Amino acid sequence: MERTKIGIFMEFYLPYLGGIERYIDRLSAQLRHLGYDVFIVTSLFDESLPRFEERDGMRVYRLPTKDLFKQRYPFFKRDARFKETMARVEAEAADFYIVNTRFHLTSLLGARLAKRQGKPVALIEHGTAHMSVGSKVLDFFGGIYEHGLTHFVKRNVTSYYGVSKNCNKWLRHFHIEASGVWYNAVNPDDAAKADDRFEDRWPRSAGAAEADTPSANGAQGRAPIVISYAGRLIAEKGVVALLEAFTRVRDSHPDLDLVLAVAGSGPIGDQLRAEYGDSKGVEFLGTLDFPAVMSLYRRTDVFVYPSMYPEGLPTSILEAGLMGCAVIATPRGGTEEVIIDPEHGWVVDGSSSAELADALMTALTEAVEDPGRRAACAAAVQRRVREVFTWQSVAREVSAVVEEAVSR
């Protein structure tokens, strides 16, 4: 029997690493496990990448883009390569299409293809607010553009699913009623990919011989409390506020050995290293592969995700929760669907970077001063992630929608 074929359109795909990319990578893996034939259509954001490749039995098509904004918001270069690649995509003749995010040009491209072929197409919404570049003027025109493109996408999409309930609330801003939630999620088996590389770097227990020896941070023989952040180094992710809050907490607690491990790269990476690279307790780890990130979470005591970005449901929060970290995060996207009360962690916010730094300082102070609450929150959020946010359950929900739509 021929397998049901699913075509997925998205702005970026691996090796570009972001929340949407990880979401689709994991979802498509589970769908293939359920027996579906899956292919990806995305942008050729890096000319060194192949226009076509097979990854783990899944076909990936990359469309050429113009140089302007190609790493942020790619526009297609409709040349002979584009036409040749799209001809191959159309020949795939998928039974069901999935597109990601209303205002991406790949979503419009995929939705129009689905309509031409008379096939159902579902849009997955990953955001909870208009995109911002930090300029009121540009954000104003960006909002107009987003509404305009959404208008055209709506003409072709047959159903909508947010990666959190808050995403579905945001869709109502565009007069769209979602059909359900396809949560962002994790694979519990991924915990086994972590190793002890960071356990060796920051031992959990100070040896007896070290009991009277000052550590690198000045504390007397105490195991370091590791605070971590993993994500893009952009101002909208709140990492500047986190660094400010950490330095204040560190300075006010000279008796504690505190470490802030920052994993990731981005436009403000060099600026942050210049300002904080020599700061006591701050370590910039750069870009880490997935096993390394999971290993970092394994050693982390407190994971902080201070995003001011219009998130859907941050993957980092789910992965850190899976690995047993206490979590401090801002109420973006579906964060409060994971950290549902103070017993599951800390939800903080601020209307500016300075206000956010103050809120983060308060939460970090509570977390480092109260190991009992820290451990209880870590255990509670880990149970919730394992019970609610798994790719196996999400893929089954997607499969049910696909089968019902294809049968019609």
Image: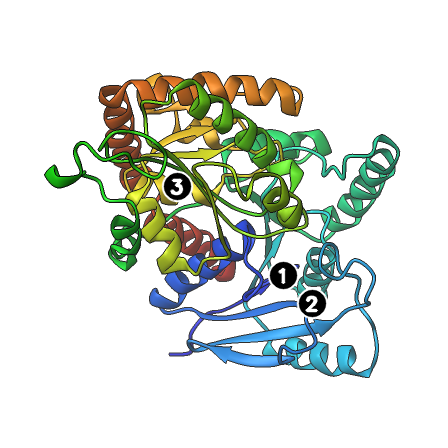
Residue 192 is left or right of residue 22, and the answer is left
Q: Secondary structure at mark 1?
A: loop
Q: Residue at x 16, y 33 (%)?
A: 211
As shown in the figure, which amino acid type bears the numbered disc 1?
Phe
Residue 179, located in which quarter of the rendered image? top right
Determine whether 360 is above or below 133 in the image: above
Q: Which mark is residue 45?
A: 2
User: Do residues under tags 3 and 2 come within 8 Å of each other at their CB atoms?
Assistant: no
Q: Residue at x 34, y 38 (%)?
A: 321
- Residue 271 x/y as whole percent: 66, 44
Counting other residues with Cα less than 10 Å from the Cα at mark 2, is it few (<14), some (14-19), or many (20 or more)? many
Residue at numbered disc 1: 12
Residue 318 is labelled as 3
Q: Earlier in the sequence, mark 2 or mark 1?
A: 1
- Residue 408 position, x and y percent, is 52, 58
Q: Earlier in the sequence, mark 3 or mark 1?
A: 1
| Helix, strand or loop status at disc 2 | loop
Hey, what amino acid is under mark 3? Leu
- Contact (Cβ within 8 Å) of mark 2 with mark 1: yes
**Figure disc tally:** 3
